[in-house]
Image: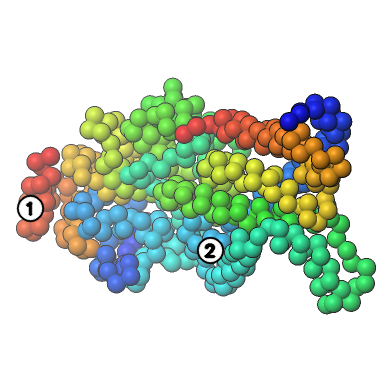
Amino acid sequence: MSSIIELKNVCKSFGKTEVLHNIDLSIQEGEVVVVIGPSGSGKSTLIRCINCLELISSGELVVDTIKIPAERKKMRQIRLEVGMVFQQFNLFPHLTALDNVAFGPTKARKMNKLKAAEIARDLLEKVGLSAFQNKLPGQLSGGQQQRVAIARALAVSPKVLLFDEPTSALDPEMIGEVLDVMKNIAKDSGMTMVVVTHEMGFAAQVGDRLIFMDDGRIVEEGKPGEVMKNPQSDRLKDFLGHVKHH
Amino acid sequence: MDFEFSVITESLPALLAGAKLTWIITILGIVGGMICGILAGLGRIAGTEALGEEPHGIFKPISVLIRYISSGYVETIRGTPIIVQAMFLYFAFPMLVKAVFDIDRFRIEALTAAVITIIFNAGAYIAEIVRGSVISVDKGLLEAGMSLGISRFQLIVYVIGPIAFRRMIPPLGNQFIISLKDTSLFIVIGVGELTRQGQEIMASNFRALEIWLTVAVMYLIMTTVLAWSLRRIEKKMKIF
């Protein structure tokens, strides 16, 4: 296995505030990495940098053998290979579920419409939403919208999927359906996944590695079960205490 | 006071001819104004995050230049009365051309001047409508588009455009109606539109009540048609 995402000494600042300090991280192909940490710890910024939605301030970031920052065309190439699922779903409100999923294949991969629709239908079936393909996002529940968003990200067949707190905006009863879809992707496709989440059960079950971030640094990492059972730092102990109470 | 219905029927052909001209100026003006307004509206936010990522290299100074030109246009038009713009274009501009390029017989037809004035005037206001709608598009949707690996051009055409367009319709309705009514100001450069026709008939028969009532109703019918068509478009668009 080779590493598909490589960060060396990466720093990221917004103005004068540094949100990522000297991050070293290497993610292998097929690995499922779960990132946890308190809000403001830089988890989201970390994965947004991997997708070039933010550009790093210093250090070295290599994604799928392309060094970032790169010229615009190459960054677009990276985004094709690195999909993203957002906390707020961000489905295109003017397109049906099917058209949302077919959007990437037709526009970014230049696939013909019939073939793209076929792929989209398959993916919607995979996330259990075949019956909803002609609905607009506004007609779907939060959990359904997020499942469509996952299908949309999968449709361009990326090598990596990033999840930015995919269940944080959902009602409790809808979290399960989204996590189930994510679990299936992890198990069936061997997709490389980086998941920012507060769902510790998901981390333990699916994660190959757990990363705890605080204040822009990676404080602890390791096998999810071990890290959760034996937290070394006070900050992680404290954090786990808070998470478990919810 | 006597109200002569026959005055209306007698003056109807002339008034209808005027209304037709008003309608032609308006339609040409708002079609041109839309093109002008979309260009200037996007121009005012060229190279900003509202249209995706900020540009690199040579595109950075170019986008700054485009922003300045678009803003200069919008502020100049908004900052001067339309009647001054019409008179400038019709009376002053040919003199300017004559002086600068030494062309003797350069002239602009009154109707042409009227159409161009409406195009540029409506364009400036539409530019602000376009800009406002575009910057109101949720940034998360832009990120979702970008994260799929589409180009900036595709982002504007397939994501920002359709979402922003739906938000433009109500304020566009306002602007179209204002532009239609603004054509009445071209009386000053002698375009035979509806108001001028009314004025001329009135000057010969002094039947102010019948004439201006008819003129007002004709404007009302035309603005109602405009408003109604826009509402149709709005309803046809899927609601979200």
Residue B121 shown left or right of residue A23 in the figure:
right
Residue at 60% x, 63% y is: B79
Q: Quadrant of the C terminus of chain A?
A: top left
Residue B172 shown left or right of residue B29 in the figure:
left
Residue at 18% x, 59% y is: A214
Query: What crowding class fits label 2: few (fewer than 14 Cα within 10 Å), some (14-19), or many (20 or more)?
Result: many
Name the subunit of mark 1.
Answer: A
Considering depth in this image, is A215 or B169 the residue closer to the camera?
B169
Coordinates of residue A132 in the picture (x, y in percent): 44, 25
Report the number of discs: 2
Q: For residue B147, say whether it is visible.
A: no
Residue at 57% x, 34% y is: B234
Residue at 10% x, 42% y is: A244
Considering depth in this image, is B176 or B209 the residue closer to the camera?
B209
Instruction: Specify the amino acid type for callout 1.
Output: Lys
| Element class at badge 2 | loop
Instruction: Specify the amino acid type for callout 2.
Output: Gly
Distance from the alpha carbon under mark 2 to that under mark 1: 46 Å
Coordinates of residue B238 in the picture (x, y in percent): 53, 31
> Looking at the image, which residue sits at the far right?
B105
Considering depth in this image, is A208 or B166 the residue closer to the camera?
B166
Q: Which residue is mark 2?
A: B47
Q: In the rendered image, which quarter is residue B27 located in? A: top right
Task: Residue A237: give its label.
Answer: 1
Q: Is residue B143 above or below residue A167?
A: below
Name the subunit of mark 2.
Answer: B
| Element class at badge 1 | helix
Coordinates of residue A120 in the picture (x, y in percent): 49, 33
Considering depth in this image, is A14 or B108 the residue closer to the camera?
B108
Query: What crowding class fits label 1: few (fewer than 14 Cα within 10 Å), some (14-19), or many (20 or more)?
Result: some
